[in-house]
Image: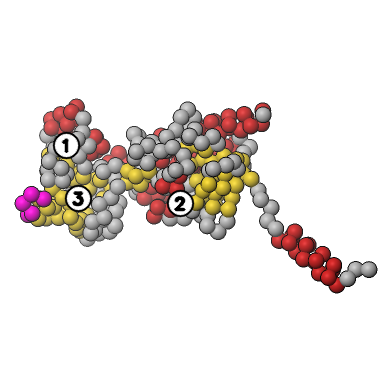
Amino acid sequence: MQTKVDFFFQILYIILVLSKKRTMIEKTLIIWGGPAGLTAGIYTARAWMNPLLFEGFMAEWVAPGGLLTMTSQVENFPWFPGWIRGGQLMQQMKEQALQQGVRIVTETVQSIDFSQNPFRISTGKEDFFAQSVIIATGAKPKLLHIPGEKMFWQRGISTCAVCDGNSPLYKNHKVAIIGWGDEAMEEALFMSNLAKEVQIITKKTTLTATKTLQERVQKTKNISIKFHTELLEAKGEKVLKSLILKDIITGNEVEEDFQGIFYALGRNPNSSLFLNQIETDNEGYIVIHGKGETSKKGIFAAGEVCDFTYQQAITSAAQWCQAAFGVIEYFQEIWQE
């Protein structure tokens, strides 16, 4: 005869069984949904891997879709005659990924544990487990955080001349390039074909760019260099109109008319989440081998989080086209074991 105590424990057992969440192990999980992450999603989805992609919610203060969402006009991405808005391009990429079966979640990954497979990925609200992880967290440009920077972002201030230089905001106007290395020289040379006047502004007393680039800059008539000069403030109304510059030797400050600024100070890879878990270089870029393989088997990376050379949307997408095959081959090896 069943006692009340037995009945109680039976009910408790049923409740526990029904409330227990089934731990699902994903084949592949993608962190961030910029051009690299979405391309990885498309290719792995077409390989029947049912990828789960966390596109992030204002991760590193960037909207889902990555830095391209902050670019007003994209004129150098293939298949779009004329130009397309960065946000629109990323929305089309996202729609394509969804059509291919990529499951996209607008949450930010807060922590990871790559110490054993399956790997643990947490949003802070919930833990997820995956047999493989695709890192596509990109990089963020180094900024100066001066007064007016936020106000005139993409309204006179940019971090990519190739992306934005042909805009009416800059074309046939006077623009400044902030930097002193190869990136600054390349940006200046590119803008010399579009802007009326290009001025390289640097706090340094010498340039660190390669000799060849320096010589090309010096031979370009509409490029000048202003050494030991610090940019203090960006001013204007609806768009950038002038800059407050300080001579760090004399201390003198002047306001000078400029219609554009291009920061060429490098980028910081968004890799802090993975430090001490996989191999990174001295700058924090993830080290990859072959088809996007990191130092940890089953963990792959591509795009600007490991590309310190090109840092373009098209190269991020192309790298993940290659790396996706690396992920697929990884699973083929598992299935054969």
> Is residue 292 covered in magenta?
no
Residue found at x 37% / y 37%: 281
Residue extending farthest to the bottom is 4
Residue 252 as seen in the image, left or right of residue 241: left
Q: Find disc 2 in the rendering and name its residue.
A: 64
Q: Quadrant of the C terminus?
A: top right
Q: Is residue 8 visible?
A: yes
Residue found at x 54% / y 31%: 325
Q: Mark 1 or 3, which is nearer the eye? A: 1
Residue found at x 30% / y 51%: 154
Q: CA distance from mark 2 to mark 3?
A: 29 Å
Type of residue at label 2? Pro
Q: Find disc 1 in the rendering and name its residue.
A: 207
* Label 1: which secondary element: loop
Q: Earlier in the sequence, mark 1 or mark 2?
A: 2
Q: Earlier in the sequence, mark 1 or mark 3?
A: 1
